[in-house]
Image: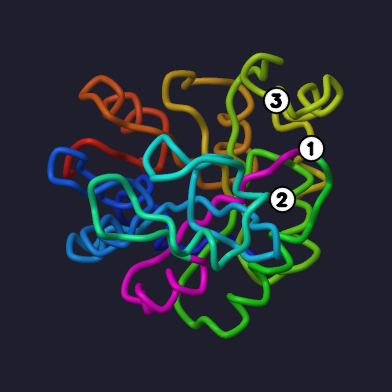
Amino acid sequence: MRAPDWLTARPVAHRGLHDAARGILENMPGAVQAAIAGNFSIEVDIQLSADGEAMVHHDNALGRLTEGSGALLGKTAAELKAVKFKNTPERMMSLGDLCSLVAGRVPLVIEVKSHFDGDRRLVTRMAEVLATYSGPAVGMSFDPDQVLALRELIPLLPRGIVAEREYTEDEWPEASAAQRRGMTHLRHAFRTRPHFVAYWVNELPAAAPWIARNIFGLPLLTWTVRTPDQRARAISYADQMIFEGFVP
C-alpha cells in the first residue's frame, strides 16, 4: 500500500479552516464546514471518552476553547457532546458525527491522540466508525504504538507518523524516557511501517524525513504552516503543508 495521491494534492486545513476572529474555532463543526467549502482536506484530532467513544478534540481536557473543565477521559460521550465551544452554539463532535458531516466530500487526516499507555481503545473505535465510512481518510499519530495499532487493527487505512526532532520530558510528560527515545529519528519505522510522514515545519530540513521521502519514497507533510517563511520552507522541503491562519 502507498499513501493516496490526494494526501499531497491540496493543502490540509489544520483542525479545520478555523478563524477565531469570525467565531470559528478549531475542530468544531463550523471549521469543518469552512474547509469543505474551500475544498481542503481536513486534519482533526480524536480523543478517547470514558465510555470508549472517539471524540473530535485536540486537548486532553476541556477549558481552552470549550466551556467546562476536566479530562475528556473522565467524561462520557454524551457528556462531551453536550459541551459547547466558547461563545458559539456549537458542540463537540464524535468521529461518527464528523464522518456524517463530511460525507466524503473532502478527505480526512485523523490524528490519534495518545496517553502513551498502550491503550488501543481509541483506534479500535476508529476502526469501527471507518468500517462504514466510504470517504477518503488516513490515520496518524505521534505515538508509534498507536501507529502500530493502526497497522494491525485497520491495515487497509493509510497511516502516518507525526514527528519532530526531539521529545523533551516537559513537552511529553506522559511518555517514558524510553518511549521518547523510540520516537526520535523515525527509528520505529520498520515496526510501524508508515505510509507517510508529517514533520514539524520549523525543523525542516532534517535527516530522518529526508531519508523517508527521498530513499523510501514516503510523502512528507509538514505542520503547522502559519507564516510566509514557513510556507517557503514547506515548498522547499515537503510535499504538502498542514496550514492554519490563512487561506492558501
Q: Can you say whether 238 is above or below 180 in the image?
A: below
Contact between labelled residues 2 and 1, with CB atoms less than 8 Å apart = yes
Q: Can you say whether 121 is above or below 173 in the image?
A: below
Q: Can you say whether 93 is above or below 47 in the image?
A: below
Residue holding disc 1: 188
- Residue 178, labelled with which disc? none
Residue segment shown in magenta? 94-116
Q: Looking at the image, is mark 3 or mark 2 nearer the viewer?
A: 2
Q: Quadrant of residue 78?
A: bottom right
Residue holding disc 3: 185
Q: Quadrant of residue 107?
A: bottom left
Q: Position of residue 173 (x, y in %)?
A: 71, 22
Secondary structure of residue under mark 3: helix
Earlier residue among tags 3 and 2: 2
Q: Which residue is more in the foreground, 9 or 22?
A: 22
Q: Is residue 111 magenta?
A: yes
Name the outermost residue toward the left.
Answer: 22
Q: Which color mode does the image show? A: rainbow
Q: Looking at the image, is mark 1 or mark 2 nearer the viewer?
A: 2
Amino acid type, mark 2? Val
Q: Position of residue 49 (x, y in %)?
A: 64, 57
Q: Is residue 79 magenta?
A: no
Amino acid type, mark 1? His
Gap in Å between the C-alphas at discs 3 and 1? 8 Å
Residue depicted at 34% across the width and 56% down the height: 28
